[in-house]
Image (cartoon, grey):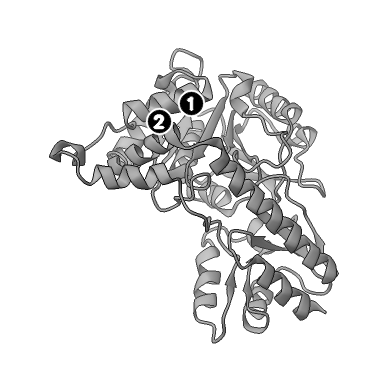
Amino acid sequence: MDYETPQFFRVMQYADGADRDVVDMVSGNPDWDPPAALREGLRDYADGDPEEFQYPPSVGLAELRAEIAERRGVDRSRVVVTNGTGEANHLATTGALDRDAGTEIIMADPVYPYYAGRANLLDADARYVPVADDGQLDPAAVDAVASADTAAIVVNSPNNPTGAVYPPETIEALVNIAEANDAVLVADEVYDHFDYTGAFESVLEQESDHVVATNAFSKSMAITGLRVGYAVFPPADGPLGGLVDRARTRHMLTNVTGSRPAQAAVLRALRETPPDYYERNRATLRERIDAFTDALDAAGAEYTTPSGSFYVLARFERFPGTMANVERLIDEAGVAGMPGQAFGEARAEWLRFALVTPRVDEAADRLTDFFA
């Protein structure tokens, strides 16, 4: 599998060049409004004093880090504010490899392509563990391939692309595997607000020195363009305390710092956004999942019903998830999804659809007609 060149933009560019209307179900860009408090925060920031437009602390605004730390039940010193979850994952993964405790990264298959691409970029040895039919990752299968050469185990729950939510017992078992092999469990929890089962539990509940939790406000607040994420590293005085120091240094040398206005707006939104903002968005997504999977039933497709996140994997008879078939769906059905091949071998026959568009019903009708 070629992870050197991410396929998302290739699909989007093809859809943009189509000579017909196309429903975009490619990327995870939420289509709903950000919190009102975030908009107000940005407007108010524009009238700030000149010093408010200068460098913030490299590790992030102190008040934002404190707010995150309080919500996650950790000390503020463990929190580094990053340019989205992507940088947070990068800092955690490179930090795990920097320890000289192994060169191998274990990931689930299917895998979010950027995890796999990062392993290639860092010249790490990638090991993939196929998930079960329901998207669940079997800790025993991870344990079977883990070794003293395992530097990191990278997981994502709620999951992209399967929609699986790993139960607490799975997370606990994965933490135990990381500890037994002196590895780092890197847990991407960016979809934590999109759990429809109540089963999600943060890896931080395990209170292990071998875990790094990464997250962002990109999905939960519908602000993928503001690039405000964070990582929670092990305590500096613990056995893996060097991870947070290395992350701070690498973050500073790469970015200097993050956007001060974006961080300030996120802080205000965290403090002032009521819980029903998030619940309304979850309710909308539940409705879209129901409508889309009903259409897949009508089209005779096999599919996953997400327990979390906002993606559906579908398999159509005699229509494998290749790039050629993705382009055919764009040209003939007017629906753009992602090829299963982009996520690995385990779901190479499938297609992935992101339900972050108000045109889900229209896309569902087009797919039903196409496969009828």
Q: What amino acid does circle 2 point to?
A: Val
Residue 233's tag is 1
Q: Are marks 2 and 1 in contact (CB under 8 Å)?
A: yes
Q: Which residue is rendered at x = 82% and y = 50% of the image?
A: 133
Q: Is residue 222 left or right of residue 293?
A: left
User: Considering only vertical position in the picture, is 337 above or below 179?
Assistant: below
Q: Could you tell me if residue 178 is visible in this image?
A: yes
Q: Which residue is rendered at x = 59% and y = 35% of the image?
A: 187
Q: Could you tell me if residue 161 is visible in this image?
A: no
Question: How far from the left and from the top, in percent, is residue 37?
Answer: 40, 42
Q: Secondary structure at mark 1?
A: loop
Q: What amino acid does circle 1 point to?
A: Phe
Q: Which residue is rendered at x = 32% and y = 26% of the image?
A: 62
- Relative depth, front residue between 267 and 354: 267
Q: Is residue 350 left or right of residue 19?
A: right
Cα gap from disc 2 to disc 1, whole angstroms: 8 Å
- Relative depth, front residue between 11 and 126: 11
User: Considering only vertical position in the picture, is 68 above or below 74?
Assistant: below
Mark positioned earlier in the residue sequence (2 or 1): 2
Q: Give the labeled residue for mark 2.
A: 80
Q: Secondary structure at mark 2?
A: strand
Question: How far from the left and from the top, in percent, is residue 248?
Answer: 36, 30
Quadrant housing the N terminus: bottom right
Count of numbered circles in the view: 2
Question: How far from the left and from the top, in percent, is residue 122?
Answer: 48, 45
Q: Which residue is rendered at x = 48% and y = 47% of the image?
A: 218
